[in-house]
Amino acid sequence: MPDELDLLRRTNPVPANGPYFGDGPLDHGAERRLELLLGEGEPRPARLRAPRARLWWGLAATAVVLATTLTALLGGPGSPPAVAAPRPLAVRAHSTAASLHRMAELAAAAATDGSPGLRKGTHVQSWSLGMSDDGPPVTLPQERVVRWNADDSRTELVVATDPRHPGRPVLSDDGGAPHLVADGHVLSRTTYPPSWSDAPPEARPPRDPAALRAYLTETAGTGTPATPELLDSVQELLDHWTLGARESAALVRILAETKGLRPVGQVTDRLGRPGQAYAYDGPGERRMLILDPRTGAVLGLETTFTRDDHRYGVKAGDVMEYSAWMR
């Protein structure tokens, strides 16, 4: 019996002297050797002809080509691919789940001296799932920094980077179809003229819980926002402002009165920070809010699918979106 490694090498549809990353069909010799390797010469099963089967084989072929490209770029099969979708945050087993009312007390105590203060602008790392009708879903990581100037103009810098794989190429969709770019590749650098809007979320957020609730309600654009809409407003707020200790304390007080947001335990976020997690289960998705266990500041917000959606090739547990805010 021939050596399996030698057989596998001769089966390789992309030989060293062939075109790189070839994605065409196997020739007859390679196809026969592959069947011999996988099935030890057993008869080949009938080819599936259903349209759905052809679609999923096409998606699988796309994934194989992408995986082959990544293996070559990132140093072999032992290297974790930089474009791998993040797994849902895992709650530590048997960890203490602090209530939001308790977190509100801790946040109020931490805000006694008013430090740190409120700052206009944001620094956020995000992972978002890009989906299409004709390809598998891909995760696009990027980092965004927004800084405001004294004249109320602002600059926004967006780069492609994934802290889980520093220095590795990352996937980006700037300028068209998803493709690999270097870590730190600048996706956009924009300067905006002065803005004097007095409407949320550009208006200064208040420190009083009742006033901040009205602010978030105006951001949501609804009479009385439900929990998912309130969390969307929180995300919008944090994408414009870096909250100070007193604003964070007011926000946690509001969250403590929110229906359906339950404590689930301790987690380590995607930037390596310890946090307390609070989950809200909605139709087809779960939102998880992560708070700093010492100050109550919002560290992150994660949305995951809770059921499969075969239209886009997503499964229960896939991360739809994750944002991690930094000071």
Image (tube, rainbow, N blue to C red):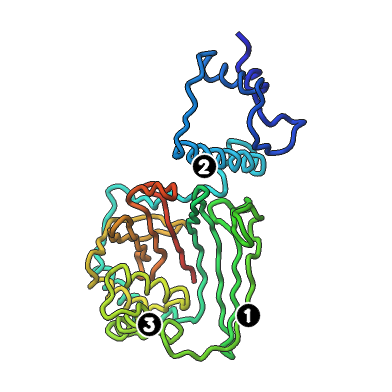
Mark closer to the chain start, 2 or 1: 2
Q: Nearer the viewer, mark 3 or mark 2?
A: 2
Q: Residues within 10 Å of mark 2 (few under 14, many from 20)?
A: some
- Residue at far right of view: 17
The residue that label 2 is drawn on is 59
- Relative to 136, does residue 286 appear above or below in the rendering? below
What's the distance in space between the residues labelled 3 and 2, CA to CA?
56 Å
Q: Residues within 10 Å of mark 1 (few under 14, many from 20)?
A: few
- Residue that appears at 40% across and 46% down: 310
Q: Name the foreground residue: 182 vs 250.
A: 182
Where's residue 304, x and y in %? 37, 55
Q: Amino acid at mark 3?
A: Asp
- Relative to 264, does residue 12 appear above or below in the rendering? above
Q: Nearer the viewer, mark 1 or mark 3?
A: 1
Q: How many marks?
A: 3
Q: Name the foreground residue: 73 vs 271.
A: 73
Q: Name the foreground residue: 234 vs 113.
A: 234
- Residue that appears at 54% across and 58% down: 141
Question: Image check: 73 left or right of 67?
Answer: right
Q: Quadrant of residue 190?
A: bottom right
Label 3 with label 2: CB-CB less than 8 Å: no
Q: Nearer the viewer, mark 2 or mark 1?
A: 2
Question: Image check: 327 left or right of 215?
Answer: right
The residue that label 3 is drawn on is 113
- Residue that appears at 59% across and 75% down: 156
Q: Amino acid at mark 1?
A: Thr
Kindly state the secondary structure of the residue where label 2 is placed.
Answer: helix
Kindly state the secondary structure of the residue where label 1 is placed.
Answer: strand
Where's residue 186, x and y in %? 65, 65
